[in-house]
Amino acid sequence: MLFIALKNLFQEKTRLLISVGGVAFSALLIIVLVGLYQGWQNKMGEYIRNLPADLWVAQEGSKDMFHSVSVISLEDENKIKSIEGVSQVAAFSGRQLEVDFNGKQAATYVVGFDTSSRVGGPLRVIKGKSAPSNGEIIIDKIFADDNDLEIGDRFPIGTEEFEVAGISEGGSLITFQYSFVTKEDAERLFKLQGVTNYFMVTLLDDSKSGFVAKRIKELIPSTKVFTRREFVDKNTEIVTETFLPIILVLVLIGFAVGVAVIGLTIFTSTIEKSREYGVLKAIGIRNSQLYLIVVQQALVAGVAGYLIGLGFAFSLSLVVGQFVPEFITLFRVIDIVWIFGATLLMAILAAFVPSRRIAHINPAEVFKA
Amino acid sequence: MSLIANSVTKIYDKGRPSEVKAVDNVSLTVNPGEIYLLMGPSGSGKTTLITILGGLLSATEGVVTVNGEDITKLKENKLPKFRLNNIGFIFQSFNLLSALTATENVAVPLIAKGVSRKKSLEQARSLLKILGLENRSNNKPADLSGGEKQRVAIARALITDPAVLLADEPTANLDSKNGHEVMMKLCGIACEQNKSVIIVSHDSRIKEIAHKVLWVEDGKLTKEEEGNHKKVCPHENLV
């Protein structure tokens, strides 16, 4: 009966266009929203995820790098190093700053790192020096573009000015980006004397993380130890907790729009063809076969709309991403698959009302001229 | 015997003030190869009777047997399959599916029966050829004349080789030439394919091909007369 579904669908091309267009719009909305959510979540955690730290040691009570302050004595570094199974310990100092620059507020998270070990430095330097000297700063490409900064330009932090020595990638936090200075500059800027914000701990054996975390806690009770995964999750919570409910609502709206558009167009078509469905019933075609025709029509419109929506979503993210750096999307296969599943569900739900209508058609009515 | 109706009655709104007896104690027997013509004024119950005989409407009382099966005892969900296999319908306004070609329209019942699409279309083409529509098989209903549409509808009714054909005003929307052509096709089908044919019509010309003419008034069979089938049927003469 698929051929009847297809013929019915393609008979009224304008209606088909509206139906497919509606699904395409709704699929586009859902794919882009989910892509943005995943993209942001991934981006937020990208820098921390790629640092060589199996464990993060923070001050007890510290939540994440952005909403609380963690201060730990540098003397504790040796205590951690003494624990069996620890390979390397590196201090991590960083602070979110907002600077008046060229008449606007420029927000950045300044990280001070040890330029000799390079631990905690930028992920990918795309221009200039890969490690700053004292008085120099490496900034993120998005930050550079937003603030018209180039290599050699000077950028103020507090009462000091830093020369842009390099431009990096992989350090965007959507609303602000990471910048990198030397450990010495950071200690001076943040007035960190004998203290740091975090310790990054590298282990000899990953499976020993539980043991090492427990030992750190025993030796330095005023600390809290996070695994890499936990620390990434804590620092991306702002996306999951703030944006997820909003995105869920928007995804549901997109889903409802899709159901409504397919449902209305298929329902209109069913009403228009109710006499033909009556004839088919009179001939002896079962209700289930007629439902199948309606469901197939909805599914074909749904799948076509989904594919168009998917194509648009990829194109849109490519094009918009060029002009709006914050438009960061990540399309995961699993998301593409579940959204396809949701589109099929959309089509099946949309076919429900028209199918009910068919069930109520009296085949004897076709004898009326 | 292909179709037997025994004391069939249909009462709408039974027991209410608006109660109407649309069919009143009708009995008839149509043997294979016979054409019965039901005539009567509008609202006399002809169409109600034909829908009961076709298993589209349940009778309040009485028994209808088609091809040996009492359809009044068949469960609601068994009726569609029974109709598909045993009864062919021809409607006044053709009722073809507008999105499908003539061949596809004819093939629909076979496809619904589970025959492959390719085989169904092949059989539909053959049937259209017999009905003189081989050159119109790829046309959609909108591109066919009234006579052609009715011949497609006849082909659709015949494709599953049913024992009974029920035709409701098959010539009403046709000019005299096409009307005559359709009449002769129905006559040939009854005679050559041994089908029981019941035609509801106001068109008195159909008397020519009918074996019997039954008059329906107020839901009752009021008069029965012989048709002219034996005198005019070219197929009968050939036999």
Image (cartoon, rainbow, N blue to C red):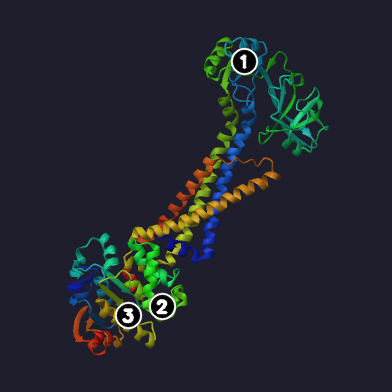
Q: CA distance from mark 2 to mark 3?
A: 21 Å
Q: Nearer the viewer, mark 2 or mark 1?
A: 2
**Along the horizontal axis of the image, is A139 left or right of A303?**
right
Q: Secondary structure at mark 2?
A: loop
Quadrant location of residue A221?
Answer: top right
Please give the name of the residue rendered at 71% of the width and 19% of the height, measured from the top-left corner: A117
Q: Percent position (x, y) of residue B77? A: 27, 59
Compare residues B11 and A174 and report the one nearer the observer. A174
User: Which-is-in-front pick, marks 2 and 3?
Assistant: 2
Q: Give the residue at mark 1.
A: A87
Looking at the image, which is closer to me, A257 or A182? A182
Please provide percent x and percent y for residue B196: 24, 76
Helix, strand or loop at mark 1:
strand
Query: Element type at marker 3?
Result: loop
Would residue A329 appear left or right of B30 to someone viewing this image? Answer: right
Q: Which residue is mark 2?
A: B133
C-alpha separation, residue under disc 3 versus residue under disc 1: 95 Å
Q: Amino acid at mark 1?
A: Ser
Q: Nearer the viewer, mark 3 or mark 1?
A: 1
